[in-house]
Image (tube, helix red, strand yellow):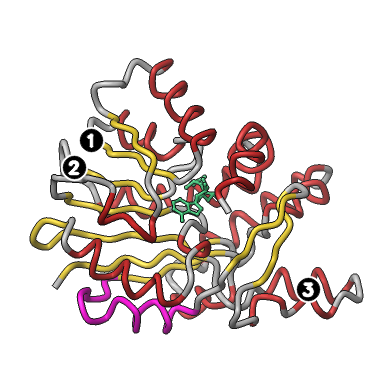
């Protein structure tokens, strides 16, 4: 699995992070975090699957201390470069760690927030998910927050897109319980899609629910970037519509991603 991400790492920012869709979806996540962390200074944050470090950089610029982790060494190299170019090495520590074995990563501190953005959680199986719930509970301070951004089992845009292409298998691929092999820039990735209910159940023993938000109900999945590139006005309308529905939690289960905020019991 991490080999696929190692291969993708050099193109990841161009394909996702700096794409119009990637920026729009990430802004929704940052909008939520902005409110959650308002007036809270110098937080200790553990980031799971940090990828190329875009969120670590954002947290660090706000003065927080981050432990950024990912399974892919190549992703971490890019994170290191970004953090050092921004002069923020005192705010960000970087270690290679597998989400499903996070308890063996030698982490000896406790965190105010544990954060996982854009599908890292979709790379682990449902059994690993339950284990993760207790592993990360032990890494959080009292009343510590957990925020994860996850791909649900159904995405209205995706189903419509593939039905219009008469590709019915892909239109409903997220429903596969065993995990689905998904191509990302030519690399095979096993992806497990999770409903909001499944995440609540898997984490319910150790966490209380704070909020659920749709991320990408009107803003489409990033593989539609090419199509929207030539239609900026249409894309701007979608961004406005997305802001207007952000309070409708039930749309989380029909979006490209959903954000779930839990708090340790
Ligand atoms: C779609 S990328 C998201 C990256 C980043 N969080 C972002 O917001 O752009 C998924 C990331 O999860 C990482 N990943 C996949 N499986 C993992 C695992 N078992 N443990 C830790 N990281 C993993 C990949 O290396 C990749 O960087």
Residue 126 place in picture, x, y as percent: 45, 76
> Residue tagged by mark 1?
64
Which of pointers 1 and 2 lies earlier in the amino acid sequence?
2
Name of the residue lying farthest toward the left: 142
Q: Nearer the viewer, residue 128 or 23?
A: 128
Q: Residue furthest front?
A: 104
Relative to 225, 195 lies left or right: left
Instruction: Identify the residue shown where x is 17% and y is 51%.
Output: 112
The residues tagged by marks 3 and 1 sit, at their Cα atoms, a distance apart of 40 Å
Q: Are marks 1 and 2 in contact (CB under 8 Å)?
A: yes
Q: Is mark 2 within 8 Å of ligand 1?
A: no
Q: Residue furthest right?
A: 166
First reached walking from the N terminus: tag 2 or tag 3: 2
The residue wearing badge 2 is 44
The front one of 150 and 99 is 99
Magenta region: 195-210
Say if 181 sits above or below 22 in the image.
Answer: below
Q: Are marks 3 and 1 in contact (CB under 8 Å)?
A: no
**Quarter of the picture holding the C terminus:** bottom left
Locate residue 88, reporting x and y percent: 31, 21
Q: Secondary structure at mark 1?
A: loop
Based on the picture, tell me whether residue 25 belongs to the magenta stretch: no
* Residue 170, numbered circle: 3
Q: Which residue sits at x=37%, y=50%? A: 48
């Amino acid at each position: 699995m991490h080999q696929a991400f190692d291969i993708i790492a050099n193109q990841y920012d161009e394909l996702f992070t700096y794409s119009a869709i990637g920026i729009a979806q990430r802004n929704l996540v940052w909008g939520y975090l902005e409110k959650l962390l308002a007036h809270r200074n110098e937080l200790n944050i553990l980031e799971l699957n940090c990828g190329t470090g875009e969120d670590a950089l954002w947290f660090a610029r706000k003065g927080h201390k981050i432990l950024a982790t990912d399974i892919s060494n190549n992703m971490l190299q890019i994170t290191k470069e970004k953090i050092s170019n921004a002069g923020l090495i005192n705010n960000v520590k970087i270690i290679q760690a597998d989400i499903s074995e996070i308890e063996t990563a030698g982490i000896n501190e406790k965190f105010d927030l544990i954060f996982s953005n854009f599908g890292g959680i979709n790379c682990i199986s449902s059994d690993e998910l339950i284990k993760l719930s207790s592993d990360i509970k032990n890494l959080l301070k009292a009343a510590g927050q957990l925020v994860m951004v996850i791909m649900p089992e159904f995405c209205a845009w995706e189903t419509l897109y593939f039905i219009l292409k008469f590709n019915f298998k892909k239109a409903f691929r997220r429903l596969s319980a065993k995990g689905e092999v998904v191509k990302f820039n030519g690399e095979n990735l096993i992806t497990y899609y999770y409903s909001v209910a499944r995440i609540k159940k898997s984490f319910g023993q150790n966490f209380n629910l704070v909020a659920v938000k749709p991320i990408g109900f009107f803003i489409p999945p990033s593989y539609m970037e090419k199509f929207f590139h030539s239609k900026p006005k249409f894309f701007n309308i979608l961004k406005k519509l997305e802001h207007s529905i952000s309070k409708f939690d039930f749309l989380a289960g029909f979006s490209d991603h959903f954000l779930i905020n839990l708090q340790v019991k």
